[in-house]
Image (cartoon, rainbow, N blue to C red):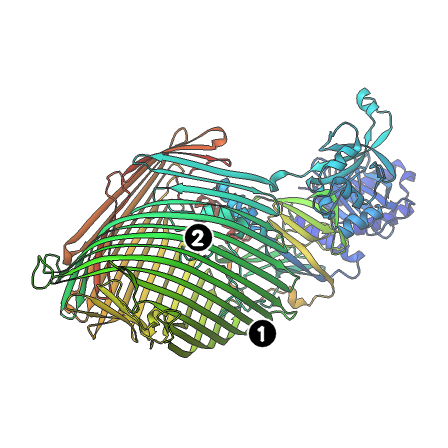
């Protein structure tokens, strides 16, 4: 309740100063490096990890385009719908992350291990440490902040733009003084970088939650418990859990 | 939990307050009142406010002008964790109200300025006013070059600015000096001395340590730029103050070079050697060296333990990033838009590329030697590979077989005792070059060659009996002693060009290939064939074969393919392809009869021919792809033209000509549904055309085996096969349940079969003929699930297959109908990291019926049971046992063979970092291994046993630079 109060407070004050809230669309390129993830699997021998690295390491990097729509109050992150390049179409993933900073609520719609979940809960800001490093991404000066994902046990490095007054960001990360334009999960296992920042009015339907969605309703605690269990059983069963869980 | 306050509006309010009540003019009373008010307000909002205070200040530039919209963050000094943040107002003022009374690290960021930070300890009183905080300009040169141009991050550490020099491109082999020249704020003088931000650099350190005394040039001139991960410039204490420990206030510019982690560069290797009873030896060594762009590896192996050549793991270690390549197949066709990895090629020995994964040979005695080297250059846009690999196999097969052939209302049985000594050696060389020309164009060039030679020695004693049992009437006794040797050279070159158009989904590809295959072979055929009819002791007739033949053949092929994909809409694509191939065969086969007077050419068997086969195919496919649904329907038209020219030899003016062409339509349908929850449904129907084999088309009678005479048939037409399949796949990564099932069907039109005519003397004459109606059908299913998750898994499988084979036997059409039933299960029990058991059982029954001889139906039953147990003992000692029990039964022939095989091994890791392993193994403890096989096909049923490597013991040692890792678990598929 306290947090909710604070958030409303912040947003109100924010809107007060910026008569026009920033709205826009950020396109991200998400690259996942499987050999790096393989190298973290405890049940594989060094030889097997090296073999994977030698064979696939130079041609690694599964690329996907993601998109984040935001207005002052809400944001929605999902995969960019793209035309097929080779005439082959895979099944579109069930995935989006919706955040409402006004009501301090989020909805995460995601397929985990072949099952679709509908996670609805309040926003809980990750704990950030702000570092003394700057770089530019798409013309915006960004500052570095680090955090940890305790469920997946990942280190998170985020680069946020002070000039984009929006607390949101890609994947499950937000809560910095500016929009996150780059996210590095676990020392480069996955890198999500903004490839385009387009400040323009965003149609409300782009931020809307689709009416027809099916998924098992869970809250954050249930979701985290389910994920922890999946990861531990997978590792125990000597399978890479991240074939079926978003890294 | 920290309190986060929004402060923008508070800051505004505060500013208005200060206008009227400047803090320093407040009376004590007013102070108290204000405090009271604050407390009340705090109580009202947060119901707690003890030990809280307000922090405020103004962010300004060096000239004192306030910076609006600057981001102000409050961090905890111990770990920089973010507690609160906000922005300055139009005047640059900020305020954090009602914050916990603890020390903070205030951090401010503003575009174009160096991020500012300051430790704040709350002062006494409610408000800590930091006053004006001046931000310094960020060095614009630095910003432009590092951040804008090189897109590298810049770290600020007090007065140290550091960046990653990898972002600054220098040519390979460049020194640190070359690198420094490119860095902003750096200047290299004529004499090699360095200036940073206008000041002379007095000291260069490497990883913080001094490098070759204080000669700054020693490091910068000698270290390669590639070795550096970071360049840091800072003001360090002078040497004087270092020694005395007294800071004299003077500072010297110091340059520190941080070295890269060496994890991207390295080498590893593995060697193992084993020595056993019965003169068994095996050894394998491999070594890899690599860095970011280069991979080099060597491998060598040898064994006489039937262990085969390279395993897939060895292959991957050897080939590295070139193990598997996308889109190396230039023969575009249906589904040409989807790029796939092509493995190997046609058969182990004939393939141009290095073969792996053939596994152990469980027949006879095999000696293998192999070795090679591979080099890869691999970067984003250019990939180059070259490899050389040699392998040889010597094989000794001594076996006995019995074979019964069913004829119209009769049968005959052959007993064969034979010995085979085969030797095969291949040198393979390969080059592959892949270049991404730009974002739209790419080129792949592949060249592979193989140089092979081999010999084969075949000795056989065969007895033919009339009837189904070998005790029946003896008909023929033959003795063979054949010897052959061959040399071959093959070369394959392919170039594939791909172009993507700017319009997404529009693609073009073209390929060109040139292949050569040149071989020479000599065969000596010696046989004595005695035919018995009236008597069982003295033959009625004897036929001796004493022939030598030499064959030279040269094949040239040029191929070209085109592919064009046009997106008709977002969901529809039209794929069009065209293939062309021109293949010429130039074969000169000379057969000589060896008589007492010397050798004489056999004009019936000698042949010289030139054959040209022209192939043209064009086709188009309409593809629908949307949200995991992929459907395609296509039609192709193809023509094969055969142009042959046959003669006894090159000088023979009499030429027989074959000039035939075959035209076919080939439809193609496919469906692929990527359904929800990891379920996939797929199916296809296609028509494939197989042109007749040139050997079958030649109008000659080959009687080199007098008991089995082949006759060519120039009127053969291509075989058309209709293939359909449907399958379903499901995997649940949460519950570990997996399932797949499906069906396949094939129907043959104009199938090439070998019609048999068996003479009174049991001499079989075969002639290739076309026949329609042969078909095959199969069903399969598999279901696996955990009994106890991660501890125990059960997997069940069933399959059924039905084959209809047609053969003409003595001009009567025989239909062999085989029904095969297979089922099995696998149970894994993996309770801990110390103990595991894997079991399996498989049963297969083959029921064969012959239409010409319905009384001769066969039922073959093959059974296999297996169990493997692993356990880990203390002190890194492991134990493994593997047991398999095979049984082969055919009641009709009283054939009942059982083969229990037990392998045991105990091993221990040793040496520092577990780099060594010593292992004692026992193979086939019961000494029961024999190569047994039994089959029923066509009108034949056979059983064979080959003398095979059986019991031996072996002591082996392995050294692995990366450590030997053992697990009682089987190697998984989990990554």
Most foreground residue, A27 or B930: B930
C-alpha distance separating marks 2 and 1:
37 Å
The answer to whether A231 appears left or right of B862 in the picture is right
Q: Is residue B451 left or right of residue B161?
A: left
Image quadrant occupied by the N terminus of chain B:
top right
The chain identifier of the residue carrying mark 1 reads B
Marks 2 & 1, CB-CB < 8 Å contact: no
Q: Which residue is mark 2?
A: B355
- Residue, x 65% and y 62% (percent of image)? B439
Both marks 2 and 1 on one chain: yes
Q: Residues within 10 Å of mark 1 (few under 14, many from 20)?
A: many
For label 1, the SS is strand
> Which residue lies at the image location 86% right of the left edge and 53% below the top edge?
B90
Q: In the displayed structure, does residue B891 sit left or right of residue B622?
A: left
Work out which residue is located at the far front of the displayed protein and give it.
Answer: B597
Residue A75 seen in the figure: yes
Q: Residue A123, image x and y in percent? A: 63, 52
Q: Is residue B960 above or below residue B722?
A: above
Q: Please identify the residue farthest to the left as the structure is shown.
A: B535
Residue B443: give x, y in percent of width and height. Answer: 60, 62
- Closest to the observer, B855 or A7: B855
Q: Position of residue B676 (x, y in %)?
A: 47, 63
Give the quadrant of residue B32.
top right
The residue where tag 1 is placed is B566
Q: Residues within 10 Å of mark 2 (few under 14, many from 20)?
A: many
Pointer 2 or 1: first along the chain: 2
Marked residue chain, label 2:
B
């Amino acid at each position: 309740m306290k947090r909710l109060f604070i958030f409303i407070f912040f947003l109100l004050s924010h809107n007060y100063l910026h008569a026009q809230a920033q709205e826009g669309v950020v396109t991200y390129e998400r690259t996942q490096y499987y050999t790096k993830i393989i190298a973290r699997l405890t049940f594989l021998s060094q030889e097997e990890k090296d073999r994977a690295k030698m064979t696939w390491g130079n041609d690694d990097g599964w690329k996907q385009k993601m998109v984040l729509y935001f207005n002052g109050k809400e944001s929605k992150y999902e995969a960019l719908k793209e035309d097929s390049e080779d005439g082959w179409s895979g099944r579109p993933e069930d995935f989006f992350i919706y955040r409402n900073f006004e009501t301090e609520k989020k909805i995460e719609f995601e397929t985990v291990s072949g099952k679709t979940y509908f996670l609805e809960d309040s926003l809980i800001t990750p704990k950030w440490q702000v570092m003394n490093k700057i770089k530019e991404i798409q013309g915006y000066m960004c500052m570095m902040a680090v955090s940890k994902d305790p469920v997946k046990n990942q280190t998170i490095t985020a680069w946020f733009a002070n000039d984009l007054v929006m607390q949101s960001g890609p994947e499950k990360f937000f809560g910095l003084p500016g929009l996150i334009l780059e996210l590095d999960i676990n020392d480069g296992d996955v890198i999500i970088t903004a490839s385009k920042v387009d400040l323009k009015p965003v149609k409300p339907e782009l931020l809307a939650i689709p009416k027809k969605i099916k998924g098992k309703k869970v809250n954050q605690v249930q979701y985290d418990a389910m994920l922890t269990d999946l990861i531990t059983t997978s590792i125990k069963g000597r399978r890479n859990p991240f074939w079926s869980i978003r890294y | 939990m920290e309190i986060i306050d929004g402060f923008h509006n508070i800051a505004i309010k505060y500013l208005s307050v200060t206008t009227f009540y400047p803090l320093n003019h407040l009376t004590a009373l007013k102070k108290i009142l204000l405090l009271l008010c604050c407390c009340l307000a705090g109580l009202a909002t947060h119901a707690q406010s003890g030990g809280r205070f307000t922090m405020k200040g103004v962010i300004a530039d060096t000239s004192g002008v306030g910076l609006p919209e600057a981001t102000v963050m409050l961090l905890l000094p111990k770990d920089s964790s973010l507690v609160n943040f906000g922005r300055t107002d139009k005047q640059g003022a900020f305020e954090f109200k009602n914050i916990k009374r603890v020390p903070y690290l205030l951090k401010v960021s503003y575009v174009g300025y160096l991020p500012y930070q300051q430790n704040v300890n709350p002062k006494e009183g409610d408000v800590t006013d930091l006053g004006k905080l001046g931000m310094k300009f960020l060095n614009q040169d630095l910003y432009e070059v590092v951040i804008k141009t090189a897109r590298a991050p810049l770290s600020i550490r007090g007065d140290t600015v550091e960046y990653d020099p990898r972002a600054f491109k220098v040519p390979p082999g460049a020194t640190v000096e070359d690198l420094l020249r490119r860095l902003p704020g750096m200047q290299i003088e004529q004499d090699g001395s360095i200036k940073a931000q206008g000041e002379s650099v007095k000291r260069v350190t490497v990883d913080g340590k001094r490098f070759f005394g204080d000669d700054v040039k020693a490091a910068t001139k000698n270290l390669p730029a590639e070795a550096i991960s970071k360049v840091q410039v800072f003001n360090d204490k002078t040497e004087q103050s270092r020694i005395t420990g007294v800071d004299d206030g003077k500072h010297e510019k110091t340059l520190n070079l941080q070295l890269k982690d060496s994890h991207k560069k390295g080498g590893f290797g593995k060697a193992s050697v084993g020595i056993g009873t019965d003169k068994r030896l095996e050894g394998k060594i491999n070594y890899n060296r690599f860095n970011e762009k280069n991979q080099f590896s060597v491998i060598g192996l040898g064994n006489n333990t039937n262990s085969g050549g390279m395993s897939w793991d060895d292959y991957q270690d050897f080939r590295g990033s070139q193990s598997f390549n996308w889109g190396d197949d230039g023969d575009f066709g249906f589904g040409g838009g989807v790029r796939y990895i092509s493995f190997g090629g046609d058969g182990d020995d004939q393939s141009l590329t290095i073969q792996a994964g053939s596994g152990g040979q469980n027949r006879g005695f095999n000696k293998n030697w192999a070795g090679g080297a591979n080099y890869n250059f691999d970067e984003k846009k250019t990939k180059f590979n070259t490899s050389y690999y040699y392998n040889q196999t010597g094989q000794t097969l001594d076996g006995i077989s019995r074979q019964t052939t069913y004829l119209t209302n009769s049968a005959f049985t052959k007993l064969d005792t034979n010995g085979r000594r085969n030797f095969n050696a291949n040198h393979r060389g390969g080059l592959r070059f892949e270049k991404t020309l730009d974002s739209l164009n790419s080129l792949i060039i592949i060249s592979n060659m193989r140089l092979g030679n081999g010999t084969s020695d075949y000795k056989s004693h065969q007895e033919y009996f009339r009837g189904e049992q070998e005790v029946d009437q003896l008909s023929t006794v033959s003795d063979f002693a054949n010897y052959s040797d061959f040399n071959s050279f093959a070369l394959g070159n392919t170039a594939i060009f791909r172009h993507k158009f700017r319009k997404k989904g529009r693609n073009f590809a073209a390929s060109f290939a040139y292949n050569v295959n040149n071989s020479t072979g000599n065969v000596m055929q010696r046989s004595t064939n005695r035919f018995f009819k009236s008597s069982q002791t003295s033959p009625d007739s004897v036929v001796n074969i004493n022939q030598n033949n030499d064959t030279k053949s040269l094949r040239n092929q040029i191929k070209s393919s085109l592919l064009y994909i046009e997106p008709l809409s977002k969901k529809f694509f039209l794929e069009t392809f065209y293939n062309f191939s021109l293949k010429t065969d130039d074969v000169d086969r000379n057969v000589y009869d060896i008589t007492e007077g010397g050798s004489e050419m056999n004009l019936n068997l000698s042949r010289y021919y030139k054959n040209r086969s022209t192939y043209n195919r064009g086709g188009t496919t309409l593809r629908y792809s949307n949200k995991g649904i992929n459907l395609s329907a296509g039609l192709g038209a193809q023509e094969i033209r055969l142009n042959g020219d046959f003669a006894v030899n090159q000088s023979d003016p009499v030429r027989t000509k074959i000039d035939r062409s075959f035209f076919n339509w080939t439809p193609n349908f496919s469906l692929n549904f990527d359904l929800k929850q990891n379920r996939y449904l797929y199916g296809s129907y296609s028509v494939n055309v197989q042109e007749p084999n040139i050997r079958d088309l030649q109008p000659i009678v080959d009687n080199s085996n007098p008991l089995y005479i082949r006759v060519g048939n120039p009127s053969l037409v291509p075989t058309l096969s209709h293939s359909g399949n449907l399958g379903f796949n499901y995997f649940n990564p949460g519950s570990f349940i997996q399932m797949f099932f499906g069906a396949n069907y094939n129907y043959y039109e104009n199938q090439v079969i070998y019609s048999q005519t068996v003479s009174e003397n049991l001499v079989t004459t075969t002639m290739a003929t076309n026949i329609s109606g042969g078909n095959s059908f199969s069903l399969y299913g598999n279901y696996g699930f955990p009994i106890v998750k991660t501890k125990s898994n059960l997997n069940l499988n069933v399959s059924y297959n039905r084959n209809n084979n047609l053969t003409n036997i003595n001009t009567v059409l025989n239909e062999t109908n085989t029904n095969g039933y297979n089922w099995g299960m696998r149970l894994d029990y993996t309770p801990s990291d110390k103990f595991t058991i894997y079991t399996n059982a498989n049963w297969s029954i083959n029921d064969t019926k012959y239409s010409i001889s319905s009384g001769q139906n066969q039922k073959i039953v093959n059974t296999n049971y297996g169990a493997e147990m692993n356990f880990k003992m203390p002190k890194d000692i492991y134990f493994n046992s593997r047991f398999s029990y095979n049984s082969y039964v055919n009641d009709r022939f009283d054939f009942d063979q059982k083969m229990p095989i037990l392998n045991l091994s105990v091993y221990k890791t040793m040496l520092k970092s577990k780099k060594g392993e010593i292992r004692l193994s026992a193979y086939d403890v019961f000494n029961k291994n024999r190569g047994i096989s039994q089959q029923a096909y066509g009108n034949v049923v056979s059983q064979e046993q080959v003398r095979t490597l059986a019991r031996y013991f072996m002591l082996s040692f392995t050294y692995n630079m990366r450590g030997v890792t053992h697990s009682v678990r089987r190697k998984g598929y989990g990554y």
